[in-house]
Amino acid sequence: MRSAWLFGQLDLSGKPSDSVPSLHAGPFYEVWTLESPWPLCVLLVIAGLTAAWFLNQRGKQRRALMVGGGLILAAGVLLLVAHFVTTTREALRARTRELIGAVARGETAQLNQLLANDATVLTSGQPWIEGRQAILEGVQRTTGGPYKVRRSVVLEEQQQIDQKHYAQTQVWVRIEGDGFFGRSWWRLAWRHEDPAKSIDDWKVVSIDLLDIDGMEPQSLRSVGP
């Protein structure tokens, strides 16, 4: 009954809250070379073609080939490196989307692999649901039960590396289900459980509901999951 009340309130069609602070962006060179290399690659290709044309017009065909070809080759190498290198921010982005998808589909088995044993759900920084098992049971009773989510969309996402083995992600998500829809901001704290394992081995230690359009997050504290 409490879960029914919660989902009945999710008529969330307002604008995103200005009260949610953004996370710090990653290093400029990492973002534009490894995570989003296309703008730089396009600039390198344009610069290469322009340089080749300019030098060729002056009868410097050999130099035109070397300079123009070198810039275009650099663009190709950059794309290749970006394809094979996964940054920590990219790994966190993928893990965050996995978690959102698992919750939306009510897949507790997959969610279990993403949560740390001491994971906690918070509302505006205050504990609400404590422990991995309690979180899994809450998901099983809601999106894994009668409150199916037909569609979930990540509208905005941010990542911040705090320390070598600690990080945060922040997402603005829209969900659509039978009789409810809405948008909400969530902040996830991640811990790299075993430094000896791959870059993908991040576990969620806290899930903080920061903002729901049309509702106060603290109002959920009187509602069971």
Image: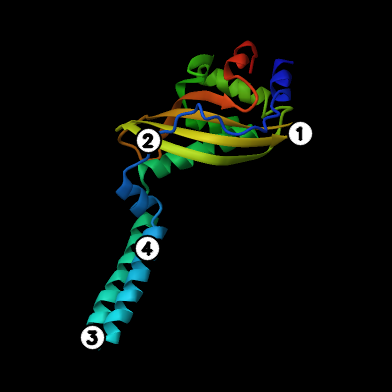
Amino acid at circle 2: His
* Residue position marked by numbered label 2 in the rendering: 24
Amino acid type shown at disc 1: Asp
Which circle, 3 or 4, is nearer the viewer?
3
Residue 172 visible in this rendered orientation of the protein: yes
Label 1: element kind? loop
First along the sequence among labels 2 and 1: 2
Residue designated by label 4: 41
- Residue under label 3, please give it: 60
Disc 1 marks which residue?
A: 178
Q: Is residue 167 left or right of residue 216?
A: left
Residue 85 in view here = no
Q: Within 10 angstroms of label 1, few (less than 14), some, or many (20 or more) residues? A: few
Distance, label 1 to label 3, CA atoms, is 67 Å
| Residue at x 40%, y 40% (from the top left corner) | 200
Q: Secondary structure at mark 4?
A: helix
Examine the rendered structure and indicate whether residue 111 appears above or below residue 37.
above
Give the residue drawn at x 40%, y 65%.
Answer: 42
Residues tagged 3 and 4 counted as in contact (Cβ below 8 A): no
Q: Residue furthest bottom?
A: 59
Which is more N-terminal, label 3 or label 1? Answer: 3
Q: Quadrant of residue 46?
A: bottom left
Give the residue at x 34% y 66%. Answer: 44
| Distance from the alpha carbon under mark 2 to that under mark 4 | 25 Å
Which residue occupies the foreground of this view, 175 or 199?
Answer: 175
Residue 26 on image: x %, y % = 35, 41
